[in-house]
Image (cartoon, grey):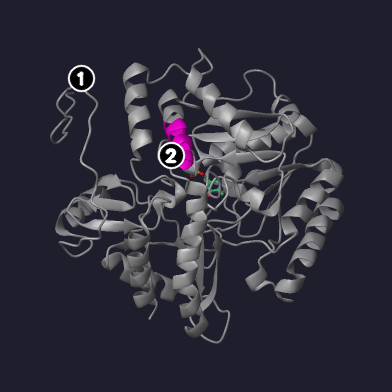
Amino acid sequence: MSLHVDITAPPAPSAAPMTLAPVEQVRKLVTAIPGPASQARHAHRTSVLSAGLGTVLPVFIERGGGGILVDVDGNHLIDLASGIAVTTVGASAPAVVHRVQEQVAKLTHTCFLVTEYDGYVEVCDTLNRLAPGDQPKKSALFSTGSEAVENAVKIARAATGRPAVVTFGHAYHGRTLLTMTMTAKNAPYKDGFGPFAPEVYRAPLAYPYRWDSGPERCAAEALAALEDLVVKQIGARHCAAIVIEPIQGEGGVIVPPPGYLQGVAELARAHEIVLIADEVQTGIARTGAIFASELEGLVPDLMTTAKGLAGGLPLGAVTGRADLMDAVSPGGLGGTFAGNPVACAAALGVFETIESEGLVARARHIEAIIRAALDPVAAVNPIIGEVRGRGAMVALELVVPGTKTPAPDLATAVAAYCHRAGVLVLQAGTYGNVLRLLPPLVMSDELLTEALGVLVEALG
Ligand SMILES: *Cc1c(COP(=O)(O)O)cnc(C)c1O
């Protein structure tokens, strides 16, 4: 058998690192979206890829820079998705590219379980320093968010000797067996994939907009329900961990009511249950703080990060209390690719960019721009039930006018309008009726304003 490797235009070998002219930061449409070249590729893709792989927008992207994605037809799209909150520092951020190029030329892999390298330790040092609280902290690296969440649960179980894990309504924690079990929504994440992992329990989420007795009673009543589940139904001494997203992402950018996260932390502390903040989506400057936990004064025992951590390269982490992180025997954590040196180099480029570009403050500025554009529209347009979020993680929940009935078809129609106009937005939420904005933090005010103009037009 011969191996036909068909790669169009292989790059010429060169000693110098590759540099490209910056991507022009403008929206530019030269064909319909998707264009003919994307359509041809998508047709081919369908014949060679599993049907289980979904795609929000069937457009093939060739290049990215800052807040722009350039497709194979030459269209420049404004990116309000950041690859699902991953390219927070922008697509192919210069510091990430530079460090990755240097690292990939020096060393691609040795496996941290075999021999050590500096990048891994530097990333962990930085995460320990940045994570909330001044207790002694340690970290371990993995390759994905799901893997980080799985390992946080493993650590909590090892440290407590208890089996049960508490999660919440509308939660999203990943696609592996344990994390899809922890995820709330059936289709598409769990549909047909059971039996699920044992000892996973679900408390109602404090979701102010949809709380039956109103947003004012949401925090107290949701906390009472959580306490009932933990103390009466599971039994606190069987409970290893409570895992919560400080702001739910896939669930629809659900911001808990003030005081709620503190209440969850108090309950966990009272029963020596490990509180795990899943900051995979909210972490690394996305919400106007390095971690969304900080916004509520939350000091979790363990914290998971991934998405925005390495500027698009696969890297996940668990960071938290040193005594918990040390409860696992040597060899109990890790993985072949976990904490890969190229991904670690990328993460160092991300930290450098957040600092040098002032991106934490920038996220808050982006929130102000989005609010200024959308709040007045929400006040007069009855399909917008709520605008919510923090920093550069903002969403619109769409409803049937005059009710709170979710309107997923409207959300699909608005997203499709934006996509045709060259603005990439995402849908989210258990009911599919939430439009989610996750722009890269380096996006200029002008580009963001233009994208929001398209969204407002679509809502109209
Ligand atoms: C995306 C996500 C995960 C899973 O991360 P993967 O890298 O896709 O495995 C876990 N938790 C949250 C909150 C997420 O948003």
Judge from the rendering whether residue 271 lies leftward or rightward of residue 177; answer left or right.
right
Q: Nearer the viewer, mark 1 or mark 2?
A: 2
Which residue is label 1 attached to? 15
Count of numbered tags? 2
Judge from the rendering whether residue 148 lies leftward or rightward of residue 320; answer left or right.
left
Residue 12 covered by magenta stretch: no
Range covered by the magenta-colored residues:
346-356
In this picture, is 392 found above or below 114? below
Instruction: Pick the quarter of the image with the C terminus.
Output: bottom left
Taking the image as drawn, is residue 424 in sight? no
Residue 409 in percent (x, y) is at: 42, 74
Q: Residues within 10 Å of mark 1 (few under 14, many from 20)?
A: few
Q: Residues within 10 Å of mark 2 (few under 14, many from 20)?
A: many
Q: Nearer the viewer, residue 422 or 51?
A: 422
Q: Which numbered disc covers residue 107?
A: none
Secondary element at image label 1: loop
Which residue is label 2 attached to? 353
Judge from the rendering whether residue 13 lies leftward or rightward of residue 445; answer left or right.
left
Q: Nearer the viewer, residue 361 or 44?
A: 361
Task: Tell me which amino acid carries mark 1.
Answer: Ala
Residue 351 covered by magenta stretch: yes
Residue 428 in percent (x, y) is at: 49, 62
Whether label 1 touches label 2, CB < 8 Å: no
Task: Tell me which amino acid carries mark 2.
Answer: Thr
